[in-house]
Amino acid sequence: MPCRLLLAVLCSVFALAAQAQQAELVANVRDQHGKPLPDAVIVAIPADGGGRLPAKPRDIAIFQVDKEFTPRVSVIAAGTAISFPNNDSVRHHVYSFSPAKKFELPLYQGVPASPVVFDKPGVVVLGCNIHDWMVAYVYVSESPHFSRTDAHGNATIAELPAKAWTVRVWHPQLAGTEAQTTRTVDPGKQRRVEVSWTVDIKPEARVRRAPSSRHSGSY
């Protein structure tokens, strides 16, 4: 067998072996009343402290639509660039004072010239200096293995190497600390692992939205 063909065969075998050793983590999160909890962030970190972020994380966008941020909660890997398109007919002034990322995008419409790079792990709270009720959250993860729960409180983290992981949950209204939600998960030879949480949630504190007006000008 020619060396080039042999190398291709060996690479395919190693790739299939690595894929066979990967597991899928299926998470379900509910609040203290047993209701599914959407927008909960699930993060998995190797128990041995290993693991690296991707060389270039995929860029994303957080939109402004009808004077609200969408999505309300985003989870990204550290180093991700986020653009903030304004799809409204009024101008917005996006900012954050969070230690993980402080920035301002002064009054604008359309798409700002440059995205914002979130290079430090932590939670970043977004606001608009003109519309106080506009709030969104960016969870910047130190791990590339994360997901966010859907309307049914479900989330999946795929392609986890078959070894021990510490898994934790964060939510904007989490009553306790993120560290208190930590679980240790070891898939072993299992291809699918299911984990569930029940967490206490605080009432959401939001500024009341101002009534719309035809005479509100460019703001």
Image (spheres, rainbow, N blue to C red):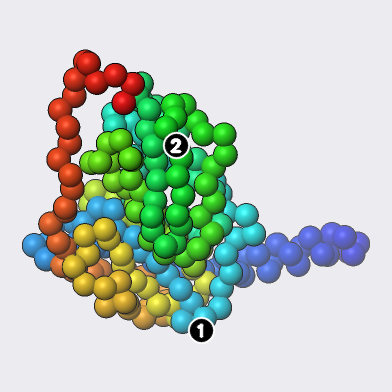
Which residue is labeled 2 in the image? 106
Residue picked out by circle 1: 48
On-image quarter of the N terminus: bottom right
Distance CA(mark 2)–CA(mark 1): 43 Å
| Residue 83 - label | none
Q: Of label 2 and label 1, which has the lower sequence position?
A: 1
Asked whether residue 50 is in view, the answer is yes
Circle 2 SS class: strand
> Given this view, does label 2 or label 1 mark the residue nearer the observer?
2
* Residue 63 x, y percent position in the rendering: 40, 36
Residue 165 in the image: above or below residue 92: below
Report which quarter residue 203 is drawn in.
Answer: bottom left
The three-letter code of the residue at mark 1 reads Asp
Q: Is residue 137 left or right of residue 111?
A: left
Q: Going by the picture, which residue comes out furthest to the bottom?
A: 48
Q: Mark 1: which secondary structure?
A: loop
Residue appearing at x 38%, y 55% in the figure: 97
Q: Amino acid at mark 2?
A: Pro
Judge whether 213 appears above or below 52 on screen: above
Position of the C terminus, as image quadrant, is top left
Classed neighbour count for the residue bearing mark 2: other residues with Cα under 10 Å, few (<14), some (14–19), many (≥20): some
Residue at 29% from the left image edge and 46% from the top image edge: 135
* The one of 144 and 157 positioned closer to us in this rendering: 144
Q: Residue furthest left?
A: 33
Which residue: 51% across, 55% down? 118
Residue 192 makes an appearance in the image: no
Q: Is residue 64 left or right of residue 33?
A: right
Q: Position of residue 9 (x, y in %)?
A: 76, 63
**Residue found at x 51% / y 84%:** 48
Residue 38 x/y as whole percent? 25, 53
